[in-house]
Amino acid sequence: MSMAMVISKSDCLSKACLAAVALLAALHLGAEPLDFKNARSYGAGFSLEGDVFVCTAKEVKLRGSTKPQKAAGVWWNVTLNQERADVVRFGAEGVADDLDESASFRVYVDVTYDDGSHQWGVTSSFDPALATGWHRREVTIRPRRPIRALSCYLFLRGGFGKVRFRSPTFEVLPADTRPLFDGEPVTAGDLPPVAGFLLRDVSAHGAWTRIDGTALDCTLTVREDMRGDVRVVDAVLSGGTAKDRAITLAYAMPLPLGNAVWFDSPRRETRLSPVAEEQSAILNLSCGRGLSCWPFGAVGIGDKGFAIGIDPDFPAMYRVVASPRTGRLFIAFDIGLAPENASAHVRFAVFPFAARDGFRGALERYQALYPEAYKVRAPRQGNWMAFHSISNLPHFEDFGFRFKEGVREQKWDDAHGIYTFHYEEPCTWWMKLGKVGEGAAKTTRADCIATVESLAAKGDAMALEWKGCAVKDARGLPYGEIRDTPWCNGIVWSKNCVPGITGAYTEFGRKWSAKALAARYGETVPFPDGLDGEFLDSSNLPVTCPFDFDRAHFAAMCTPLTFTPGAVPRVGIYKGFMVAECVIALSKALRSRGRLLMANTAPVSSCLLSFHLDVMGTETNWRRGVWEPMGDDDMMFRRAVCGGKPFGFLMNTDFTKFTYEDSERYMQRCLAYGMFPSFFSANAATEHYFSQPSLYERDRPLFKKYLPLVTRIAEAGWRPVNRLLSADAKDVFAEQFGDGFVTVFNTSSKTRHVRLLPLKGASAAKELVAGEDWTFPAEGVEIDLPPETCRLFHFINKQ
């Protein structure tokens, strides 16, 4: 094994420095001397002062980013090509030196496994307080399969400043022969022989312990109800503690391994052997061990399927995992306990499904189990308009609009069947400051805090709201990011929007209290007349601090607190749960009034908000120099999570480079998934597509052709299980909508020869894109499908 230190050619290193660092590394790693020939820097790079890496952040364009970011650091490329899944550990010492308030510095590892799959962003953060001095952070990776290579980073990101790193170590530890349960080694006797709960004290790096009542100074109260063949489990974990604790609570059930399959997604499945590593679909969110992206995890054994799924009304930091070596299927919750909030309420269901239908069969059963989470409350569907009057468009009906972000010309919208939504952005306050400078004139967060305090002293409502709701970072400081955007030159403050925060001035109270909604909607105006609902922008909170460490907010949370990852976990409020509690409360209030809730950037990678939203969508850019459409995995995730609810895009791109052919490819791809293709702006603010007749008139024939088709199948509703038509070629997928529609889409950039096979006697269909009549004999039809081409079949005779 060798490890390559990466240093840019621009770094001036003396031979003495090189020798010193190489010797240091050899002492720490017990490995070969470092190879400097493959040297690279991260972001603005680093310099060496003896055996210390000095990283000073500058604005640079990172790989994969569209805008410059403040970053600096060093990284190592480690090629292992493991034959067995040995544990690896990477770490270093770090210290802050003149660090900007919004910056963070950390140990960070990306993993590539032997099958080409990845585990991104295994990380541990250093303490940004200058007084902390040198301290060590490490990440330990217990791989789910042999590792091909790792990228190991030490970096500063998110703000200006300088940090130092020293004593980097990388080691490969002999594989523990014991099986892993949620990434931790266990022995056979550690796990209950029947379904039951286990507990692990993560703060103390403890082992798994069975809990049936009390264990590890915690009390677990459990109620189980059988609803037919479904077991609903309701559990409350409490621990009257005088200090913060990071706890993982798991519910495990025996998993027979005869011919077992883990259903990864609607497109993929993984065969489980008794020696296979753990299988899951987890997002790395800098929280505990991560969050499942899907609402459930599912396994098939022969013709029987078994699944565990979260209750949509009880969000938590959860994941569902299949552990073949321990013979268990389990759900785990990462829970923070604190003196201010010393209990956590979780709820989930264990349910069977038809294994022949795989992941889709589990999703179909889950939808039936929680029908309110998938109920379509906007049966009339269509395109999304952002911040522009539809009435100004000649023959507006050609563009298929149904949902409008922003309140204007409301009476006209009512008369023409357009839903209008009142705009808000949760968890943020964009505070304008005038020109924000850099260098000697650079505006600091301290300057911004002083401005807010001055406003609060004058009775400014927004400033008083900030005082009660501002999110606190790891240093206990109000978090904000200084930004120069088309809509605000100043600072965007992070605020906690949960309804449980009390006081005269709160974000939820100002925007969505019963008083605010009554003023906005009245008590007697029948739906759909008047304002039709609320629109939440940036619901994935891209500029919000990942964690709120304000202890005054802990008690306001209904969702369990959670904790940061790494060797020293810290209890806090994950930002996703702030908006989740807001969405749940707002959804209930709106539904009681017959109104709708729409959100931008939902779903992105998690399903938690989608249960309580009625209309979803996202801004996107499929041409950054070259044509880069959203891939099938991302499109399929959104479709499956939304179910039959409407989902739409706003294309935000440089329209001088977005051609007529691009527009047609865009609309065909959206048609394939029953999603709506609209347009907005290159910078999400100015030069609106629908303010430029040269653009929308050019594309009008495409809208007239594709929008009626998208609307027809979207309103029919996507079906998890396709029971009408199958396609047998690579990269060609068939999706069913309603009882009689099927889209067949070639996702690739090459023509595919495909056989279309009718199911359950469906034999005659009208192909609606080209307007042709088709007949499907029992043996199917073979065709050549051009690249990125969608066909839409309407079956008129089916059993």
Image (spheres, helix red, strand yellow):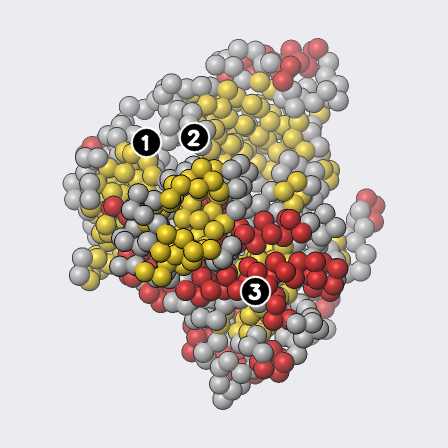
- Cα separation, mark 3 vs mark 1, equals 44 Å
Tell whether 539 sits left or right of 88.
right
Q: Which residue is mark 3?
A: 383
Placement of the C terminus among the 4 image quadrants: bottom left
SS for callout 2: strand
> What residue is at 47 percent from the left and 64 percent from the top?
712
In this rendered view, identify the residue nearer to me: 38 or 640: 640
In the rendered structure, are the residues bearing label 2 and label 3 in contact, judged by CB atoms less than 8 Å apart? no
Amino acid bearing label 1? Glu
Of the pair 240 and 196, the residue shown nearer to us: 196
Q: Position of residue 314 (x, y in %)?
A: 36, 60
* Looking at the image, residue 184 lies above or below residue 740: above
Q: Residues within 10 Å of mark 1 (few under 14, many from 20)?
A: many
Q: Residues within 10 Å of mark 2 (few under 14, many from 20)?
A: some
Which x, y percent locates residue 468? 58, 66
| Sequence-first disc among 3 and 1 | 1
**Compared with residue 321, is residue 407 higher up or lower down, i.e. above or below?**
below
- Residue at x 21% of width, y 57% of height: 230
Marks 3 & 1, CB-CB < 8 Å contact: no
Seen as rendered, the residue at the extreme right is 440
Q: Earlier in the sequence, mark 2 or mark 3?
A: 2
Q: Nearer the viewer, mark 1 or mark 2?
A: 1
**In terms of image quadrants, where is residue 129?**
top right
- In this rendering, the label closer to the viewer, 3 or 1: 3
- Hey, what amino acid is under mark 2? Ile
* Sequence-wise first label, 1 or 2: 2
Pointer 2 residue? 141
Marks 1 and 2 sit apart, C-alpha to C-alpha, by 13 Å
Residue at left offset 23%, top offset 50%: 354
Q: Amino acid at mark 3?
A: Asn
Name the residue beneath numbered marker 1: 277
Q: Pointer 3: residues within 10 angstroms few (<14), some, or many (20+)? A: many
